[in-house]
Amino acid sequence: MTTLSPSTDSLPAVAGDAAPVLEEGHGDYRMFGLATFLLADGMTFAGFFAAYLTFRAVNPLPAGAIYELELILPTINTALLVLSSFTFHRAASELKQERMGRCRWWLLVTASLGFAFLGGQMVEYFSLPFGLTDNLYASTFYALTGFHGLHVCLGALMIMIVWWQARQPGRFTPSEHFGLAAAELYWHFVDVIWLILFGILYLL
Amino acid sequence: MLLVLVGLWVGQNVNMLPVAASSNAPLYDQLFTVLFVIGTILFLGILGLLLYSLIRFRRKEGDLGDGVAVEGNLQLEIFWTAVPAVVVLFVGIYSYDIYDRMGGMIPLSDPHAMHGGMAMESAATGPSDSMPPGMVMAANVPSAVEGAEVRTWGGIGGSPGSSSGALPVDVTALQFAFLFHYPEGDFISGELHVKAGQQVELRMEARDVIHAFWVPEFRLKQDVIPGQPTILTFTPTRAGSYPIVCAELCGPYHGGMRSTVVVHEPDAFDAWLDQNRPATVASAASGLSATG
Amino acid sequence: MTLALPPTASSAPPSLQPEGWLRYLSFSLDHKVIGLQYLVTGFIFYFIGGALAGMIRIELVSPMSDFLQRDTYNEVLTLHGTVMIFLWIVPVVNGAFGNYLIPFYVGARDMAFPRLNAVAFWLIPPAGILLIASYFIAGASQSGWTAYPPLSLTTPAAGQVVWILSVLLLGGSSIFGGINFIATVLKMRRPGLKMMQLPMYCWAMLGTSFLVVLATPVLAGTLVLLSFDILAHTGFFNPALGGNAVVYQHLFWFYSHPAVYIMVLPAFGLVSEILPVHARKPLFGYTTMVYSILGIVFLGLIVWAHHMFTSATPPWMRLFFTIATAFIAVPTGIKFFNWLATLWGGKIALNSAMLFSCAFIVHFVFGGITGVALAQVPFDIHVHDTYFVVAHFHYIVYGGTVFVVFASLYHWYPKFTGRMLNEDMGRLHFTLTFIGFNLCFAPQHWLGLNGMPRRVAEYDPQFTLVNQISSVGALLMAISTLPLLINVIWSAFRGPMAGDNPWNALTPEWLTSSPPPVENWKGPAPLVTHPYGYGVPEGQIDLKGASGKELWTSGS
Ligand code: HEA
Ligand code: HEA
Ligand code: CUA
Ligand SMILES: [Cu+2]
């Protein structure tokens, strides 16, 4: 996550996206680092997915256990999250045209969609007929959606930070806006993970 | 060539295994010999090459020059990619064959159980009145298997009852003992008694944690995993007593979790079986008190 | 200059950091300092892990459980395995040498993310202390380094949870390190330096780091689920609650098999640096070496179930994993034959670094051959979870990787400190270690074949003698660390000055002073396009007809 990379603000403007390695230089590899990190994070999810699919293939639901999912709320939630990817993209393109006001507005919309998603998930959690330890599938359901929810939560907070930072004039420029770009990449990643998760958990 | 001869000699003459006491043990020993020969040849060859280089190409005192600047040799490199590949392929096929002959490739359980979970969909639907029909999904996770049909998860030798004429024994592993239940006679023994020459079918289950059933003289080992009934079939061939060892860490007394398998000659086994039938035991006890 | 620092800081970089020996205890951002921090920490944990191994071997002198309680024995062996893998080998071959050497090799002044690098290192001491402390406070984990459920769910929870926490921290450290290495190798190369001109260790670290990044997160996720099972009483891996214990094994080995290559690929890289220097010859077959590393990385990811041949896996799975596993011998074999060819026709200086490297070749080939045997299902069914396996992996991790660590120490010590190590002490260290090691672990093969399971404090008395031989070997290994320690400490103060390049080597770390200045070179970074450009042209040396044909007919 972004906090792991050196802080954004202190980079000299020359070493921006466009500046590759100069003789003594040190380009900006933070996006590359973030992408590698997301690869690792994705593998964590992959491990969970594999576990879930294996459970499904070999472990029957114990007699009398309840594991039912309803589809309406999660579908709405999915739509919200997909939408938020587009709104974030919109925010970034507003930034490229130096319309900071609109950029911030779209950031706020994105974050709100993220929080709405989390709210929806809470509602779903409380209305489900099974609890964390009821049976294998219940546990797996909560573990998977919970771990993803944690990511959404972090992402939404990150967006709020970026939104706050964007208040300072000159903090993000069309050519130099690592914080925002990182949050965007991360957000898309979380979105894609959700689509896979939705597919195997609810639809399969 | 010398190397090959040495390798063959070592493989034939160095015996590192305990006695072979089941029908698959000789197969195993055959595989072991082959692996041992190949391994010896490869190892001695490389060792020789290394020692030779170290001696032959030692730097002389005061010589500060360099060696030859060879950076590679495609033919050579292809050669030593191909040789291990061939060796490995040969070994793989050979050991597959051995494993097949040991009964390891017999498919476990019925094919239905493998995919059964996916096919069966729970018919239970939730409180659908509050929502439009179809939007409530009973998650189609494999539902509870209705029948009593128990799935076999692994092991050697196929599903229960597949081998007719085999002596069935139910094995329960728990911290820290093996219990052997004989359906023929319905009694429990702390030792495994079997008949030389007759196939045995162990139906194994664990109570608490994972254990492993291992008889070194049979060259057989099978994990016994809670929740996953397992089958192990084998044919003992040599009368005698051999240790049963638990080979999977199962707690503090893992090292003490041992038992014995007694392979009887056929009539001795029947006698043993008779002796232990609950009815016989009762009468034997009374008989004992009468004579004693 | 590290541009990730604020510009103000980079104008006066050293003043922000403590100087002298104090910087080794600080949150330093200098890759060389971090590398040595890793190295020294790693050695401390090596001695702790070795002391634990000593306790194991003392217990096994007699067939009864007398020296240690049975559950204490299990704690000791769990700690031994965990410390040796996660706190000694992985941090040292990756963290220590990686951090020290990679920036030199790519011609950079530091790693791509210096701060992340320091964070990665500083996760290690607390994780290690936590792990060791668990033994004294609540009792350490008793379920082996593999922590198979349901056993790990039923042993005392406190120790197990601390174990999980500590492994999670170490895994995190390893992932951060991996990200850093990938970025440094791929992105920080000096202009004009091509991938195929990099020293082999860079390739090894690149491959390793990909394994780290792909596999370690799976372990992390698995351990989180395991901790849920322990703390929240979920039933992922608990059959009593409808879970599946074998799924844990799959997930665990999906990490832990690649982990064995995480432990050995960097060692391969280090050997590839050491051999050409002391044999005064180019590394043989650079290109095939690179491809074999990539091949090992790929195959390494798809062979995990060979640890589970007796775990009730379906037959097709056993078949697939047998073949895939055995095929790793092919790329690995390429590397070994290339090294032998590197030695062939060289002018070999048989110093301590070279001796340890050659012993590595011998031990690894031996351990690799037993590995290929283990990969055969029918063979493994007999020896799985016995001392045969213990012998296999100690041949590889100790006879292989640890020997390479020693070789590297002798090779790079002059660079680290500016002083030479004593050669005679080095040879004494080698001789004792070599004899002790083989005495300790060779007999264990026989033990496994004849019926001694692993992880037991008590055993069949028929094995007493062989176990005692093995323990004597362990004692020799313990003694052998004395000359090493004396040598390293004494030479740091009294050793003869090394000069910049005592071995006349060509790789870039030798083209600067010893020890190197803060930003590695006083002037611009040198461009080294032929890191192995040793040797005189063919024909100027008469090899007495040592043709390739002879090479291999005498070989197999
Ligand atoms: C650095 C660590 C390391 C490395 C590199 C390896 C390398 C290999 N390992 Fe090992 N292994 C471990 C560490 C390692 N292992 C550990 C720690 C365990 C136990 C874990 C536990 O349970 O606690 C283990 C266990 C283990 C098992 C499971 C045993 C069991 O529990 O039943 C198996 C089975 O297949 C196996 C196989 C192999 C193979 C085939 C290789 C191959 O990569 C080896 C390839 C190398 C060569 C073959 C030599 C060079 C090649 C040639 C000279 C070419 C010619 C050779 C031939 C044609 C054969 N290992
Ligand atoms: C890199 C990994 C590594 C290394 C280097 C070693 C090194 C050694 N190992 Fe270990 N070992 C493992 C990894 C490693 N091991 C693993 C993963 C397991 C499996 C654990 C499990 O089953 O879960 C294992 C298990 C294992 C067992 C099997 C235990 C069992 O199954 O019951 C044995 C038994 O002999 C053993 C012995 C040794 C010995 C004698 C050394 C020696 O080479 C050590 C030599 C070093 C020294 C002797 C240090 C000398 C220093 C001192 C003595 C200082 C003393 C200091 C004080 C007293 C403060 N190890
Ligand atoms: Cu039961 Cu070990
Ligand atoms: Cu492995």
Image (cartoon, rainbow, N blue to C red):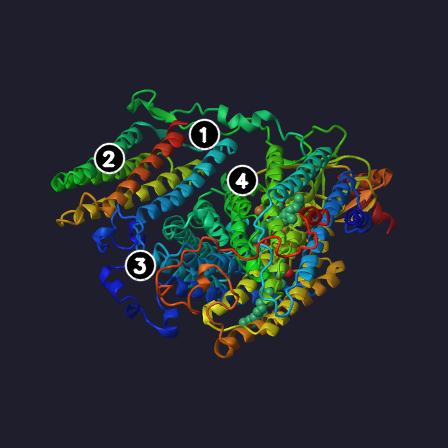
- CA neighbours of label 3 inside 10 A, class few (<14), some (14 to 19), many (20+): many
Residues at discs 2 and 4 both on one chain: no
Q: Is residue C260 left or right of residue C2?
A: right
Coordinates of residue B246 in the picture (x, y in percent): 66, 49
The amino acid sitting under disc 4 is: Ile
Q: Which residue lies furthest to the front in this view?
A: C540
What's the mark number on residue C302? 4
What's the mark number on residue A84? 2
The amino acid sitting under disc 2 is: Ser
Asked whether disc 3 touches disc 4, contact meaning CB atoms under 8 Å apart, the reply is no
- Establish if B63 lies above or below C206: below
What's the mark number on residue B141? 1
- Quadrant location of residue A131? top left
Callout in the foreground (3, 1): 3
Nearer to us in this view, B289 or B196: B196
Q: Which residue lies furthest to the bottom in this view?
A: C494
The local secondary structure at tag 4 comes to loop
The amino acid sitting under disc 1 is: Val
Q: Does the residue labelled 4 lie within 8 Å of ligand 4?
A: no
